[in-house]
Image (cartoon, rainbow, N blue to C red):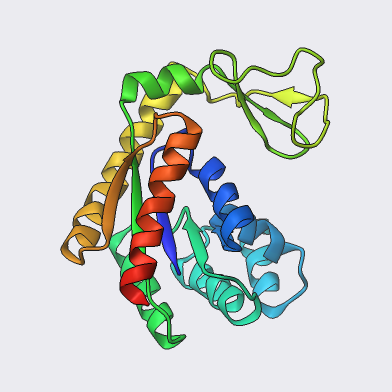
Amino acid sequence: MNIILLGPPGAGKGTQARTLVEKRGMVQLSTGDMLREAKDSGTEMGNIVADVMARGGLVTDEIVIGLIREKLATVKANGFIFDGFPRTLGQADALDKLLADEGQKLDQVIEMRVDDAALVARITARSTCTNCGEVYNDNTQPIPADGKCTNCGGTEFKRRADDNEESLKTRLMEYYKQTSPLIGYYYVKKIICRVDGLADIKTVEAEIAEVLDRVAKVDA
């Protein structure tokens, strides 16, 4: 099963993706992670990425699609989670074509809806473990009293420099401008559903699991 998690920064996409990886054997395809991995891989595609990044150029849709194609061909998984791609209608069309070429399809798009004001409050209280990326929140999931990450035992945590109210409002506006057409695109295809991204983690996890189980039954 192949899915897209849509949601603004801080909606919890990464947290839910990790759960799907652990519990369903899916693989998360994050554009940023793929580019960093490719840059150091020494493969033909990796050398292209390294050259573009060294020149400070823009990574084209064709390059990202090429990286995804490599993953689909070489990684065994119970489905893929697309994170950070597509962002435009052109990219959405390209992803559909790629999946069709590989004998696959996009099964579900899950939009993690949020209230903007509540999201800003959540993110400005956010910090992450520098070792494993585990996310903590001053209000809802504070760093443990012993100062150790519950996931990896790390003791160093950081806040993003742009996790402030003004920067977040700008990032949210950019997100909505980019993704509004995508939401309509997938609505027409009847493969998008919405969950409350600001519910507690376990509730969101259960809602996503219910959606994917329902889709699996239809496809069975």
Q: Which of 99/218 is in front?
A: 218
Residue furthest toward the left? Answer: 188
Query: Is residue 123 rendered to the left or right of residue 142?
Result: left
Residue in the image at 63% along x and 54% along y: 22
Q: Which of 178/156 is in front?
A: 156
Could you say where residue 109 lies in the image, as x and y percent from the top left?
A: 34, 57
Query: Is residue 150 rendered to the left or right of residue 55?
Result: right
* Relative to 93, residue 145 above or below: above
* Relative to 184, residue 128 above or below: above
Could you say where residue 92 lies in the image, as x and y percent from the top left?
A: 33, 66
Indicate the quadrant containing the C terminus: top left, top right, bottom left or bottom right: bottom left
Could you say where residue 204 lies in the image, as x and y percent from the top left?
A: 42, 39
* Relative to 39, residue 95 above or below: below
Residue in the image at 19% along x and 58% along y: 187
Q: Exactly how many numbered labels are in the figure?
A: 0
Q: Quadrant of residue 103?
A: bottom left
Q: Which of 29/94 is in front?
A: 29
Query: Is residue 144 rendered to the left or right of residue 61?
Result: right
Residue in the image at 83% along x and 24% along y: 155
From where the camera sits, is residue 56 visible?
Answer: no
Q: Which of 133/51 is in front?
A: 133
Indicate the quadrant containing the N terminus: top left, top right, bottom left or bottom right: bottom left
From where the camera sits, is residue 139 visible?
Answer: yes
Residue in the image at 38% along x and 76% along y: 105
Query: Is residue 25 rendered to the left or right of residue 144?
Result: left
Could you say where residue 179 lies in the image, as x and y percent from the top left?
A: 30, 49
